[in-house]
Structure formats: structure tokens, C-alpha cells
Image (cartoon, rainbow, N blue to C red):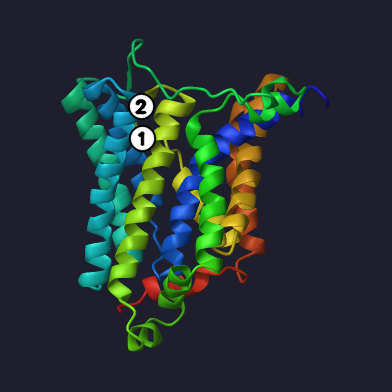
Amino acid sequence: MQQLFDAAMFGSTLRIMTPILLAALGGALCSRVGLFNVGLEGLVLIGAFSAIVGNYLFGNVLLAVIFSIVIVMLFSALFAFISINLKANAIVVGISLNFLATGLTTFALRAIFDVKGAYYDKDMVGLPKWDIPLIKDIPWVGDVISGHSPLVYLGIIIVIALQFYLFKSVSGFRLRSVGENPVAAQSIGIKVRGIQYGAVLMCGVLCALAGAQLSLGQVTMFTEGMTAGRGFIALVATMLGQANPLGVMGSSVLFGFMEALSIRLQGFALPTHFTMMLPYIVTLVAMFFFKDRTYAQDALKAGGSSR
């Protein structure tokens, strides 16, 4: 048991939960403005691929992350335009975006790199690992907290910043009012569409960072469909966390822990297919028990009807 729940296990939890956390925070922002963004899976997948393309083109990991952000923001703007301006069903738009991302990344993988299935370059440099001074020397704690990519620590900082922004700032109150009562918000001069666009674009930034963590932080390669449902798990984390940044982080830690546990259990002679099911089983259980207690229900209703 001690060998199972060691420092490396909890360190893996932090690393694995980061893409889920970042995407879920983006989903929380969309929920707060009344848009249920089902396209998180596609946005993260595009972010992962464009990060690899950026690294291939520029040979610089920072420029690769910036390139990924720009590309995913373009797709987020497309989602916003169709959902907000054209008043299309946001759920249908999100599902379409997921299919577009799957097909487009598969096609681009062959068109750009002339490979099928996966792209890997042994000379490609991924995100650096940061050792935190003093903390790295603390037994157990240093092994858990230190030695991760910058995006892991950035994700935690974003949680704190968003918590303060949404519940302690005037602009955060305005953003929340757009999702709770857009008619009332517009009647007092709040630019509803502008705030919705801002939230969706910020969601794109967070999903790009999530994708970059997947393809440049955890591994340094891209494979077709490498998100493997993490975007949908992020949706559940958003709902389970009540679209509250701290709640979303707690949910993401749970899902990250279960995925890390499933990987660790593979070393105990358990069937691989069984252990790989654990994160998704927990996701289904969470949806069942908390189906009537999610803030995102209002956004889901708004997204499922023509506005």
C-alpha cells in the first residue's frame, strides 16, 4: 500500500490533472456567461497539435505555446461567432467543433509531417521542468511539488486569480451577471456579447495551455486523439465544481488522482483495460450523484435552446 501511494504517485496526480484543470477552468468561464462549451475536447486537441507544430516551425517551446494559443483562440472565436451572433445551438456547435478537430488534426498530421498516427522527433525540446528552491529539498513534499513544467504551477495561479476575479472584482460580478440574467445585465449597460466573447476567447487560451501541457509537458509528441476524453472529463469537473475555480480544482485533482492510480495499478499485474477504465468510471459516478447540483445546468439549458 505504501508503495502504491508514494510521493511519485501524488506528483503524477499534479502533472496529469493540469490539462483537465486548465480546460475545466475554461469551461467554467463559458458556463458563467451562459454558454455550455461542449467543444473543450476539440479545443484541447487542437492546442496539443498546434503546440507541436509551433515547436517544429520555430524550434522554441515558448513560441510554440504562443502559437498554440493563437490557433486555439481562432477556433474559439469561430465557436463564439456561431453561438452568439448566429444564435446557433451551442451544444451542437461544440460537438461539431470536436469532430472538426479530430478530422483536421489527423489530416494536418499527414499533410505537415507526412506520418500517420503519431509524430515524434527525438531532437524536439519539451517544456522545462522547474525545481523549486528550498521546497525541492524537503523529503516527500519536494518530490510531489517540485520538478513539474511551468504550466502546472501556472494552472494553480490561474485558479487563485480567477477565484478573486469572479467573486471579488467588479468586472467579475458583471461577467457572472451575464450568465445569470443577460436581459437585466444588458438593461444596465453591460455589453453582454462583448463579455461572452471575452470568456470564450479566454477559454481558448486555457484549452491551448492544456493541450500544450499534454503534447509538450507530459510527453514530447503528438498522437491522433491524444486527448482521450480529457475534454469531456473537464466538462464534468466544471459541473462538479459548480463552475467555481476552487471547486473545479478539487474535481480536477480527483480525476487526475484516479488516472494516476490507474497507471500505477498497471504495475500490480492488473488487466490494463480494467485500470484504464477507472477515470471514466469515476466520471460517470460523479455525473450520476451530482446531476442535480451543478451550476452548469443553467448554462446547459441556455446552450440547448435558441437564444
Q: CA distance from mark 2 to mark 1?
A: 7 Å
Q: Residues within 10 Å of mark 2 (few under 14, many from 20)?
A: many
The mark nearer the N terminus, 2 or 1, is 1
The x and y percentages for residue 214 are 44, 32
> From the viewer's perspective, is residue 12 above or below residue 257?
above
Q: As drawn, which residue projects farthest toward the top? A: 122
Identify the residue shown where x is 47% and y is 68%.
172
Q: Which residue is mark 1?
A: 48
Q: Name the kind of residue labelled 2 in the image.
A: Phe
Residue 284 image position (x, y, % from top left): 60, 53
Q: Is residue 249 left or right of residue 183?
A: right
Q: Nearer the viewer, residue 14 or 259?
A: 14
Foreground residue among 85 and 205? 205
Q: In the rendering, which numbered label is found on residue 222?
A: 2
* Residue under the image location 51 percent in, 49 percent down: 158
Instruction: Looking at this view, name the residue that lies furthest to the right.
Output: 1
Q: Are marks 2 and 1 in contact (CB under 8 Å)?
A: yes
Give 214 or 289, whichever is nearer the viewer.
214
Residue at figure coordinates x 76%, y 29% from the top left: 5
Q: What is the tally of numbered marks visible in this picture?
A: 2
**Does any portion of residue 88 appear in the rendered image?**
no
Measuring from the top left, give residue 265's x and y in whole percent.
69, 27
